[in-house]
Amino acid sequence: MDSNPVKDKMKRGEATVGTWSTTGDPSVIEVLTHMTDLDWIVVDFEHNAIDVSTAVNCLRASQGSGVPMFARVPYGEKVWIKRILDIGFMGIVAPDVKNAEQAREIVQAAKYAPEGIRGIGSARGQIAYGPGFYQKANDMTLVVIMIEDPAAVDQIDEIMAVPGVDVCFVGPNDLAQNMGVPIGLDNKHPDHIAAVQKVVDAGKKHGVFTGAHTTGGEEAARRIKQGMQWFPMSSDAGMLKMGVEGQLADIKAGLAGELGDDGETGGTFY
């Protein structure tokens, strides 16, 4: 892979849809990358019991699928960013960035000179992406900055002006909590809606892609119409839960005589 297909797709004006991996399970990653049409997967190190030695097997499970793997680091610290990128992830998601200086430090940590200060030493990067890895890594690497605080919304123009910031991604629950409004994805509080719209508008002005964590396909479609191009639907664990619940609902509907003549309500057993 000589370029980042997610970056390429967004540059063409298209939306990209992925999901969060909260399990960090290679078997789950293998299914999601080889058997679905998701554009990307983010392995979430921030809130889950996932370590680097497990994550490298997630990367191996995705190999050959053409689906880029990104990682949300626990915080925007250069050692974490270096380790994550060195094992082969094609981008990072940095949580709770409040200002342009933090965004600049994250970009610097994710890029080789002359654009940054990332150290040389990614043996697996060369294995996964070929001998020209160091020359193409800066262009391939996606840098996603999370907007989770009203301070970041207030400084969104300055954050988006930092060279190398590819995506500004809204974390709806943390943003709501820090704004002092009720939490919830697809948040309907007017102040939250206004804050998210401010991020989207700034992205259009600065040429920076935007996104938000979505509950599922219906919200994702609305976010695409709003102008967003990068967002996850739920998580691997969340979709597993929704799938099981859907099949159990089909069983109950069938027992209640609510299934059609073909025996289906829309759910399908794998």
Image (cartoon, rainbow, N blue to C red):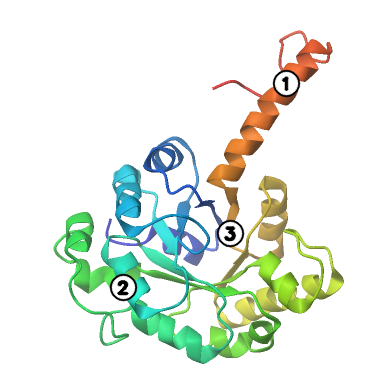
Give me the C-alpha separation between circle 2 and circle 3. 23 Å
Q: Which quadrant of the view contains residue 73? A: bottom left
Choose mark 2 or mark 3, whichever is in front: 2
Position of the C terminus by quadrant: top right
Looking at the rendered structure, the kind of residue marked 2 is Lys
Choose mark 1 or mark 3, whichever is in front: 1
The residue that appears at 47% across and 78% down in the rendered structure is: 165
Looking at the rendered structure, the kind of residue marked 1 is Asp
Q: Earlier in the sequence, mark 2 or mark 3?
A: 2
Q: Earlier in the sequence, mark 1 or mark 3?
A: 3
- Residue of label 1: 250
The image shows residue 33 at horizontal and vertical percentages of: 42, 43
Position of 21 with respect to 254 (left or right) is left
**Labelled disc at residue 231:** 3
Q: Is residue 64 above or below residue 167?
A: above
Q: Earlier in the sequence, mark 2 or mark 1?
A: 2
Instruction: Report crowding for label 3: few under 14, some 14 to 19, many 20 or more residues within 10 A (C-alpha).
Output: many
**Labelled disc at residue 82:** 2
Q: Is residue 146 above or below residue 188?
A: below
| Mark 2 vs 3: CB contact within 8 A | no
Position of 54 with respect to 213 (left or right) is left
Q: Is residue 124 above or below residue 174?
A: above
The image shows residue 126 at horizontal and vertical percentages of: 18, 62
Q: Which quadrant of the view contains residue 194? A: bottom right
